[in-house]
Image (cartoon, grey):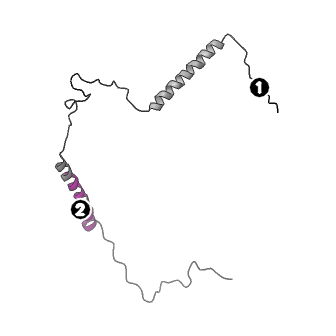
Amino acid sequence: QATTRVYLSFPRTRRAPAMAFLLLRSRQRAAAAVRVAARGYGTSLPIPNVLAGTGTIFHSRMQTPKYSLSNPKWFAIFFAMNLGVYFGHYFYLRFMMRQNPPNPPRDPANTGAPEKHMHTVEDE
């Protein structure tokens, strides 16, 4: 079986070198965009260099914590908060929330019952 190949040919003009340059330029931009998108993390801010004589980038004098709790203080606050949440919940249920009235007693004669159940199939 012989296959025929069709080649598209475009007329050569004086713009061909400019078009080739634009095509090359667009491919370079696409490749650069793919490299940036593939990284997907990082910062645009300047990255600090290691301070002389410290051996680390961020030494302890550079980032002092504004608020710091020891473990016993933190866990004391954590458990106090949990106890407050649970006691507050049960306090609301017991003292503040309205209670439902009790159900009325049943009628032993069942006077409100329908004669025929509403979902029964009617046989004709």
What are the residue bounds of the magenta stretch? 77-103
Disc 1 element: loop
The quadrant where residue 109 appears: bottom left
5 horizontally vs 83: left or right:
right
Q: Is residue 75 above or below residue 37?
A: below
- Earlier sequence position, callout 1 versus callout 2: 1
Query: Mark 1, mark 2: which one is toward the viewer?
Result: 1
Q: Identify the residue at horizontal 55%, vertical 81% (top origin).
A: 117
Disc 2 element: helix
Q: Identify the residue at horizontal 66%, vertical 13% (top origin).
A: 16
The amino acid pointed to by label 2 is Phe
Which residue has dot 1 on it? 6
Q: Is residue 98 magenta?
A: yes
Q: Identify the residue at horizontal 26%, vertical 68% (top origin).
A: 94
* Crowdedness near tag 2: few (<14), some (14–19) or many (≥20) residues, C-alpha within 10 Å: few
Which residue has dot 2 on it? 87
